[in-house]
Amino acid sequence: MNSYESLLKWNGHTHTNFCRHGSPAPMEAYLEEALKHGFERYTISEHPPLPAGWIPDEPLMRELAMREEELPGYMEAALGVKRRYEGRLDIRVGLELDYLEGNTGYSERLLEQTEGRLDDLLVSVHYLRGRGGMRSIDYTPQDFRDNLLSYYGSMEAVVGAYFDQVEQAVEWAGSLSCGKRLGHVNLIRKFQTALPAMDPGQLDERLRKLVPALKRYGIGLDVNTAGFRVPTCGEAYVPGWLLAVCREEGIPFVFGSDAHKPEDVGSGWEWFARTVRTEANA
């Protein structure tokens, strides 16, 4: 990725009709949108199942991921479209695998069920220990205030706990087979305008600290643009300066629209391409 001209048009983070908080549109609707936008490669990366009772909010729990019995059907559907679109679109079958503090064995057992048929893994942190148990960091600003900010006592403490989890996720991901990337590294900023301010120095320090670990474990970066579509965020979940650092260190990074509906498949690509071109020419 040394220049804009040589950039492979790859959407490396997308969802499907198996996502309970996304669109019921079939996989083919996403793939046709990808072709319309000129993508050459496309990763299908659905949320896999979560352990029963992983978070205390049962209604939310039902919306977060597919059920265990649905995983074989997801794999069959994804492998099916990969075959049918061969020659038109290079489809990578993957999962957006959560780092589950204290329960990584659950995720490892899920991977065993895929029997080596995965091409791509995104490893993400969506959950932190909070009031009453594990809590989602990206549900609502009010939930963040009530169950995380009140639990840790300050934004500095929440941000610190989040990046501690991200560091653990990177180390764990290093033990997993197949291609892997760290998902939306700055997801903690999703509700930034609705919460007390975060310390930019703390954020930059923790992001820079991740770089040697990404390089050591051979893990790439998901350049996730979904934050542009969130009114309380308004930015990508990866800062542009981090792409320059990754390029210098030889750490691969891949655009990810994090589409939960077909119309978002191409969302953010122009920002990504422009940012990569700017960094390459700097």
Image (tube, rainbow, N blue to C red):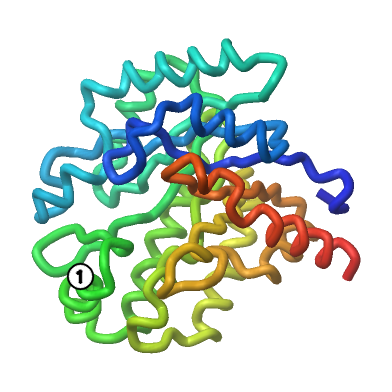
Q: Residue at x 57, y 51 (%)?
A: 222
Q: Residue at x 41, y 88 (%)?
A: 197
Q: Residue at x 57, y 11 (%)?
A: 83
- The amino acid pointed to by label 1 is Asp
Compared to 147, does 134 lie above or below? above
Compared to 180, does 234 lie above or below? below
Compared to 46, does 260 lie above or below? below
Q: According to the image, label 1 marks what residue? A: 143
Residue 31 rendering spot, x and y as whole percentages = 56, 29
Which quarter shows the C terminus? bottom right
Residue 163 appears in the figure: no
Looking at the picture, tell me which residue is in the foreground, 188 or 260: 260
Compared to 102, does 113 lie above or below? above
Please tell me in which quadrant of the rendered image residue 97 appears. top left
How many numbered marks have been drawn onto this rendered protein structure? 1
- 30 vs 17, left or right, is right
- 257 vs 124, left or right, is right
Residue 282 appears in the figure: yes
